[in-house]
Image (cartoon, coloured by chain):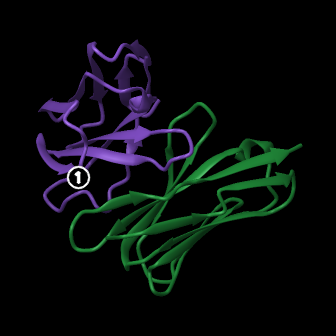
Chain colours: A green, B purple
Amino acid sequence: GQQVMQIPQYQHVQEGEDFTTYCNSSTTLSNIQWYKQRPGGHPVFLIQLVKSGEVKKQKRLTFQFGEAKKNSSLHITATQTTDVGTYFCLMGGGSNYKLTFGKGTLLTVNP
Amino acid sequence: ETGVTQTPRHLVMGMTNKKSLKCEQHLGHNAMYWYKQSAKKPLELMFVYNFKEQTENNSVPSRFSPECPNSSHLFLHLHTLQPEDSALYLCASSPAGLAGVAADTQYFGPGTRLTVL
């Protein structure tokens, strides 16, 4: 079956530093989505990537989908305290419907 | 507010109790989901309903029984739970359609924090 790895599990940064989280799949994906969950909150959709090699930006956030459609990254430039939370990838794979969440990366930011 | 509501927000129950979690979506979506979120574990997909039909059951124990009377409402009936079932139970919905749900954006409710004593 499809195996998903998301790293790192935790990341603590000083405000202003950059942050990156990675998701890797053992199988080729049809799409990948990224979600953010604030402490005590629920996951909120950030973006979806569908095309091989796709790069999308949302202000300080940059999302990439690998050429082989097996991995993806979320990069935050110059973190702010409002970026605190857990970032999850949701991987959609194969011809059959199959959704798998990554374990998430908990980001904490020191002001 | 995402348009997905869940009640109750908190629930404490004994192992012999029977309770139900309710989810309602006001987005006109066709698919609804139940997830379990435990500490230090990834989100676990439990059930998926698409056009009121169950399309996914990820080997969930029978003490969890879902019900989807229509595309706007989803229930999770609980009975004889175990302490390890304590978790945040999240409901989500997505537009879906005849092509399926694999590429859908999901809209999550606030969750029900369940504690089993």
Residue at (29, 44) in percent of width and height? B46
Residue at (25, 57) in percent of width and height? B101
x%, y% of residue B91? 35, 35
Q: In this view, does B78 lie to the left or right of A72?
A: left
Q: Is residue B60 left or right of residue A107?
A: left
Q: Is residue B5 left or right of residue B88?
A: left
Residue at (20, 59) in percent of width and height? B100
In this rendering, the answer to whether A97 lies above or below B43 is below
Placement of the C terminus of chain B among the 4 image quadrants:
top left
Viewer-side residue, B45 vs B50: B45
- Chain holding disc 1: B
Q: Can residue A56 be seen in this view?
A: no
Dot 1 lies on which element? loop
x%, y% of residue B14? 36, 13
x%, y% of residue B4? 36, 31
Look at label 1 and name its amino acid: Ala
Q: Can residue A5 be seen in this view?
A: yes
What residue sits right under mark 1 in the picture?
B96
Structural crowding at the residue carrying mark 1, measured as other residues with C-alpha within 10 Å and reported as few (<14), some (14–19) or many (≥20)? many
Q: In which quarter of the image is residue B7?
A: top left
Residue at (33, 17) in percent of width and height? B15
